[in-house]
Amino acid sequence: MKQYNQFILSVLACTLLLVSGCRSLPSDHTDSSGFKEVQLEVLKVFSANDGNYHFRSYLVEWKGQEVVVEDSLVYTNYQVGDQADVLVMYHDHPDENQETGCLGFTVLPPCKEGSLSSDDTFSPNSERVQLEVLKVFSANDGNYQFRSYLVEWKGQEVVVDDILLYFDYQVSDQACVLVMYTDHPNENQETELLSFALVRHCKKRE
């Protein structure tokens, strides 16, 4: 669990650094950490909200495979047909016994005024629910793999990532999902964040 938490924090840190620093890379750039920027056409937009909390991600095609790109901080508003700036992330699995590496996709947000400060904090609330798997998205690049699941939540289609490839749900399976309501780390943003993660047991926290 400690390795899992460190891995998730490293992925979140990369996203926040890109937002705060407005990093711009040439389209063919791949750095030594296993990151590559590409432009991909948006095939479908997944969007959900619960009050002022919002979720957004995009279906794209990458190397002939359908994958889902997260917009964790809801900074973009791409429409079908738009070209999205996407960061492809290659990570070694935090469990050294796992030979498969982890492949992830996140949107590169546009530069905006109001960077994140060191005092920004998250105030999450969450609940666990069981949701039926409607579709499985899977991709690979060599030994690196990506997997996520399309589910319906409150009448809205959302996508849940299996970052560490711990699950192997099939269509119609019941997935246990943690729904997280999070304050936006940038105080200039009125929109709050809604996100979804897979968990092993569907029991609401005490």
Image (tube, grey):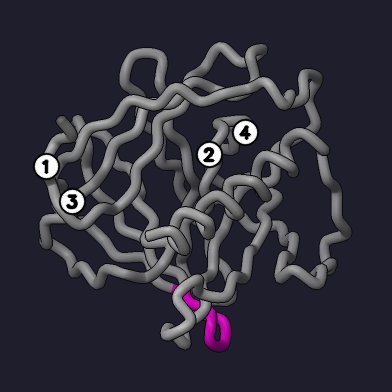
Front-most of residues 206 and 172: 206
Labels 4 & 3 near each other (Cβ < 8 A): no
Front-most of residues 47 and 24: 24
Residue highlighted by disc 4: 76
Residue 143 percent location from the top left of the image = 53, 86
Q: Which residues are magenta?
A: 139-145
Mark before the other along the chain sequence, 2 or 3? 2
Labels 1 & 2 near each other (Cβ < 8 A): no
Amino acid carrying label 2: it is Ser
* Residue 42 magenta-highlighted: no
Residue highlighted by disc 2: 72
Q: CA distance from mark 2 to mark 3?
A: 20 Å
Q: Is residue 178 above or below residue 92?
A: above
Residue highlighted by disc 1: 203
The residue depicted at 69 percent of the width and 45 percent of the height is 108
The picture quadrant where one finds residue 195 is: top left
Residue highlighted by disc 3: 176
**Camera-nearest label, 3 or 1:** 1
Element at badge 1?
loop
Amino acid carrying label 3: it is Cys
The quarter of the image holding the C terminus is top left
Q: CA distance from mark 4 to mark 3?
A: 28 Å
Element at badge 2?
loop
Q: Is residue 153 above or below residue 166?
A: above
**Is 28 displayed left or right of 39 in the figure?**
right
The residue depicted at 46 percent of the width and 27 percent of the height is 193
